[in-house]
Amino acid sequence: MSHSSDDFASIYDAVIAEVMFNVERQGALPESVTIEPTNVAAHCFMDVPYEELLTIEGDENFVIACGSKIWDRLMGEPQKLVLLEDLQSGVSREQLMARMTENALQSAVVLGSL
């Protein structure tokens, strides 16, 4: 069963509202929670072709989505800044994705199944 991006957006918005309600209820600061923009989250959580990642607007959103999709984790700020610098220095999005994929494969070979 497939869902449209509109379905994802409404579900994601409801989940975010619940998360923020619980954060505030527990006395934490809302700004302490990192919430990915819907267009980034949709590419991270849904099974999308890598080519679709290339259509994401904004380099930062692109890098975050690639980290979640290719590395299967949220990346730290230092990693994100390095990847953004690569893009600004002329590395294409395709090249960046290839590097990230190669890195993920190398880590899988070195670390194996955790």
Image: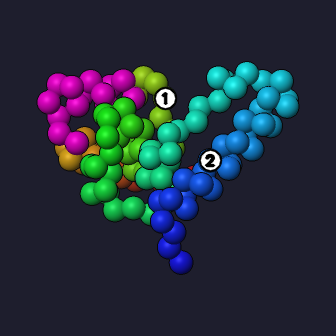
Q: Does residue 95 show up magenta in the picture?
A: no
* Of marks 2 and 1, the one in the foreground: 2
What is the residue that sits farthest to the bottom in this orientation?
Answer: 1
Callout 2–callout 1 Cβ contact below 8 Å: no
Looking at the rendered structure, the number of numbered marks drawn on it comes to 2
Q: Which residue is mark 1?
A: 76
> In terms of image quadrants, where is residue 60?
top left
Residue 95 drawn at (x, y percent) = 19, 43
How far across and how far down the image is residue 45, in percent? 51, 55
Task: Mark yes or no: residue 56 visible.
Answer: yes
Q: How is the image coloured?
A: rainbow
The disc labelled 1 sits on which kind of residue? Answer: Gly
Using the rendered view, name the quadrant where residue 64 is placed: top left
Q: Residue at x 53, y 78 (%)?
A: 1
Q: What predominant SS class does the magenta segment belong to? A: helix
Question: What element does badge 2 sit on?
Answer: helix
| Label 2 sits on residue | 13
Q: Residue at x 50, y 59 (%)?
A: 6
Q: Examine the rendered structure and indicate whether residue 97 appears above or below residue 32.
A: below
Q: Residue at x 20, y 47 (%)?
A: 94
